[in-house]
Image: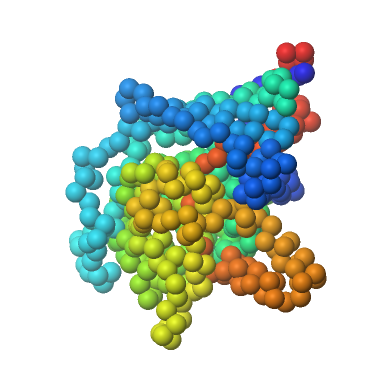
Amino acid sequence: MPLTVLTDYDVRTLLRSLTHADIAILQHSLAEALHAYSSGAQDDGCCSMYQPERTSFALKGGSTTLFMPARTSDATGMKIVTISETCSLKSMSSLSISSRSDSNSTISSSTTAADLPPSSIASSQSTTPKGSLTLLDSRGAPRGLINAEELTAFRTALAATLIFNKRKHVSTITVFGAGKQAYWHIRLALILRGPEIKRINIINRTFTRAQPLLKEFYSEEATDWRSNTKFSVLSPEYGEYGRLLKEEVRKADVIFCCTPSLAPLFPAEYLTSHEGSKKGRLISAIGSYKPHMCELHPDILRQAVSPPHSHHHHKHANRGGVIVVDSLDACLKEAGEVIQAHLGPEQLVELGELCIIKKQRMEEMEEQGIGDAGRKEGLLEWLTKGNVIYKSVGLGLMDLVVGGDLVMLARERGIGTTIENF
């Protein structure tokens, strides 16, 4: 049995060669696995009942090592990664998420504590998970060893853009963060729906750290898939940061939160107020992965799951009454936003349950008439136009499925090192 080894350089080379068609195939494979995970089909190895829980332990210096085992019907794997958590809290420890100022204030007072980026992992240290993914076939024979640094960011964005693909409006995108996660969320969005995206605004703690990201997207290599999208960067270094932050959040059709933040990235009122809740948008929060971490204010999640008020006549975007998560069990235990909003399992729905909603709707319309299909129609309306929040803490199954597909692609394209008869 051959073993394929993919270094970080190999993985980046392979991922950056992917076309729209390649990504569509990878997404379909991932969607099928996630659906099997959520459906409870015991004849499929991807089923959640067969997935071991991930474990972790803390290291000296504040880092955490994660062990993420997974299995499918024909493969087993384990990703082991270490994440730096050295925090810079001193200068930001007094931030309040409840205070805010009038956007019409003068420059000197338009940016309040609530408007500033919250405490997060120190930008001087990389927070990209470092480690590897080991792949075994159904008999236990090694078939792949992959550097996990780029893989982790890619598979997270690949899952997040499953919902993004269904959205009707994606003209304006706001991205929090400027690391690998931000890069892959933006790149996949542009490859998948570039001509429809008019503007992407990157919000980061410093403009300097966002510069390399901009250079990537304005490089010659990116001209084939960047389309005519315009980019801008916003940071607290601007005097009008508070006012502009509110504008960028409210104007966005899609918000990608890609930071290991310890507190909400913006005040809840930006989206929970009458003005903020008019527009339907997709919010994807993938940066926080522990109970004390939080990118979105809990009030935003509470409003999303609250029943609509039928007595008022104000126009608001449709709410689905649930938060979309990658794993119900994992998010109830690890997702700070879900925990701090005190949400229960009945207020969450797994991404895998929604992956084939369009296919189910068509089948029901043909076989059952308009009854159940009508309810699916309402669900599809919410997914495509309403306010949708997706929260992810990561699944080992994602790594295993995407990693296995990348190994096959690498062998086909002569990338990496393959050791015969390992």
Toward which corner of the image does residue 292 lie, by quadrant?
A: top left
Task: Look at the picture and state if 11 lies above or below 46.
Answer: above
Q: Quadrant of residue 8?
A: top right
Residue 340 picture location, percent across and down: 34, 52
Q: Quadrant of the N terminus?
A: top right
Residue in the picture at 49% in, 59% down: 346
Does residue 318 lie above or below 16 as drawn? below
Where does residue 37 sit, x and y in percent of width and height? 63, 45
Task: Judge whether residue 243 can be spotted in this image.
Answer: yes
Number of numbered discs present? 0
Q: Name the spot of residue 111 as percent of width and height, x first.
A: 25, 60
Q: According to the image, what is the colour scheme of the structure?
A: rainbow
Q: Position of residue 180 (x, y in %)?
A: 50, 40
Between 320 and 92, the one nearer to me in the picture = 320
| In the image: residue 111, left or right of residue 193 | left
Residue located 73% across and 32% down the image: 74
Residue at 46% x, 34% y: name it.
128
Quadrant occupied by the C terminus: top right
Taking depth in this image into account, of 108 and 172 the one nearest to the observer is 172
What residue sits 70% from the left and 72% below the top? 373
Is residue 201 found left or right of 188 in the rendered image? Answer: left
Q: From where the camera sits, is residue 175 visible?
A: no
